[in-house]
Image: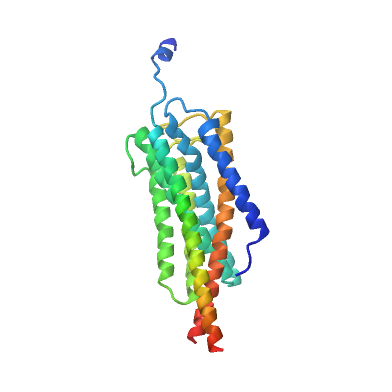
Amino acid sequence: MLFSFFLQEGPANTTNYMIAGYAVIFGVMLIYLISLLVRQRNLQKDLEVLEEIQGEEQ
Amino acid sequence: MDSKPRLLTIIDIVTVVLLLIATYMVFFYAPQEAVMGDVQRVFYFHVAAGWVGMLGFIGAAVAGIIYLIKKDRKWDIVGLAAVEIGIVFIFINIVTGSIWARPIWNTWWTWDPRLTTATVMLLIYFAYLMLRQGIEDPDRRARFAAVYAIVGSLSVPLTYFSARIFRTIHPIVIGSGDPNATGSFDMTPMMLQTFMFGLLTFTFIFIDLFWHRIRLGRKADQIEQLRLKTME
């Protein structure tokens, strides 16, 4: 027990993997958020064009 | 388009604040795991992303059932929104799991039951999106999507229980898992608090994104109706 305590090494150096993991988490969430905003904007443009066409027809 | 509801704005703000606190807890409050080191911190958002993904797929199945009963297309919009969010978060879950596995299992990927069922689940819902694109008639598309989402949701419990039923090296942190699992650890109270707070935060992220995506779907539906009218 005592021996194993003295032989125990510190935690593995895995900081780079943690950074990569959180870059993926925040990166993907950000991309999805941007995609929602872009689609929202494009749909608004489409809606305006369609309403304009309908107005002209009437 | 109807203006943004006040409650949605409040949920937006609460979600951002919760995410900031959860991120702080992950990096500065939760202690470093004694063996795995910093990569263990990926676990907090990895599990939370899996939770959101599964919520999305189960939500899509519920929306599918309601659609088949009521035949109201708004439930198809809800189902699509749930699947899309589910895909995004299961993708995060799988990729972060792979990043964690590299230093712990010494490989980026292994065809372990949990990893395999999660990947199959993701592919099932990718197919859902692709197949929807191929159906022109909105009502037929909604009916097909509802049935598909209900059948596809069987993959959710299968994925969740795969690590508890089959022999696996995937660790089970909550409850008991395979003793041969590699990378298991016991959570200290501070780790548990961070984990639970992460789950709460991601539940808010789900509600927030879900609402926004439903609003987007309603707008797309409105445009589709207008287009059909214009073409007539």
Q: In which quarter of the image is residue B77?
A: bottom right
Q: Is residue A27 above or below residue B171?
A: below
Q: In which quarter of the image is residue B132?
A: bottom left
Q: Which residue lies furthest to the bottom in this view?
A: A58
Q: Answer yes or no: is residue B154 visible.
A: no
Q: How many marks?
A: 0
Give the position of the N terminus of chain B as an image quadrant.
bottom right
Q: Answer yes or no: is residue B69 visible.
A: yes
State the colouring used for the structure image: rainbow
Q: Residue furthest top?
A: A2
User: Which residue shows up at 56% across the image and 63% down it?
Assistant: B214
User: Which residue shows up at 53% across the image and 39% down it?
Assistant: B23
Q: Residue furthest right?
A: B6
Q: Nearer the viewer, residue B181 or B35?
A: B35
Q: Nearer the viewer, residue B226 or B157?
A: B226
What is the x, y in percent for residue B75?
A: 57, 67
What is the x, y in percent for residue B139?
A: 51, 75
What is the x, y in percent for residue B88?
A: 46, 53
Q: Is residue B81 above or below residue B205?
A: below
User: Which residue shows up at 47% across the image and 64% down it?
Assistant: B148
What is the x, y in percent for residue B64?
A: 54, 64
Q: Is residue B116 above or below residue B74?
A: above
Q: Which of B180 and B38 is in front in this view?
A: B38
